Amino acid sequence: MSEPTDIELKRDRLLRILQGLGRVAVALSAGVDSTVVAKAAQLACGENAVAVTAVSSSLAAGEQELAVEMARQIGIRHQVIQTQEFSDPNYLQNPVNRCYFCKTELYTRLTELAPSLGVDVLVNGANLDDRGDYRPGMQAAGEFQVRSPLIEAAFTKSDVRELAKLWNLPVWDKPATPCLSSRIAYGVEVTPERVQRIDYAEQFLRQELNLRELRVRCEANDLARIELPIEAITQLTSPALRDKIRTKLHALGFRYVTLDLDGFRSGSLNLLPILS
């Protein structure tokens, strides 16, 4: 009998951790991290596990439907809830810790729902790599005693993808899909209109450029800063395509449309001096 692989050892550790928690609610966004935790919770806890997906204006098109499908495939109980972060003036002002107010709203709602869901512990999909970026939402998790079983089981992002592939989860190679509000520069007000504009712009660009991963950042004065993979930037040397994109984004309400020659970088707004 062969020795278990590293990912098999981590998988078993993850399942033991979740089993030890008893009745758990998983915050399921349909990203690869939370989907892996939902799958593990279903395996470890069975009917004592439930996945909860929060829906608001900041959720990109198609993500709610994907979460419903992932929960169905996994076989875990699933509930969709509406969160009200857009009613919080602290969130709308878009300070550098905006995510803290969003996660506080989420965990408040989940804590209130815990008795009706029949759960004792909330868990999220944070992994070890998340500790290397600016993550104010982790502060909210700590305040609500939310557990991070992937971190406890020593999972990196690559480990999560490897396990998702092992479990045949179709999101194993899904690009990161942070909330739409994360595209808005700190200090620029977050509004439903702005996040919808960003969502429409990104959908349009994905279709036109046949790309899975890109960002439309909303800077001050409603300037759109398009981030594409470096190898895709040359596509915009076509005058016809460039004019089509420019016309569409202006029609959506962006006053200026720019292309970032540094290319796509996840979390690029966290590189600004405001965080130093």
Image: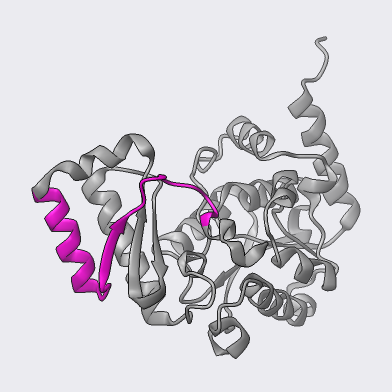
- Across and down, in percent, residue 213 comes to 41, 46
Q: Residue at x 13, y 57 (%)?
A: 244
Q: Is residue 93 magenta?
A: no
Quadrant containing the N terminus is top right
Q: Is residue 265 magenta?
A: yes
| Residue sitting at the far left | 240
The answer to whether residue 232 is above or below residue 97 is above
Instruction: Using the image as rendered, state which of residue 109 and residue 262 is in the foreground.
Output: 262
Q: Which residues are magenta?
A: 240-268
The answer to whether residue 22 is above or below residue 114 is above
Q: Quadrant of residue 76?
A: bottom right
Which colour style is shown? one colour
- Across and down, in percent, residue 17 comes to 87, 47
The answer to whether residue 113 is above or below residue 49 is below
Q: Residue at x 33, y 65 (%)?
A: 224
Instruction: Using the image as rendered, state which of residue 98 and residue 256 is in the foreground.
Output: 256
Quadrant containing the C terminus is bottom right
Q: Residue at x 77, y 77 (%)?
A: 111
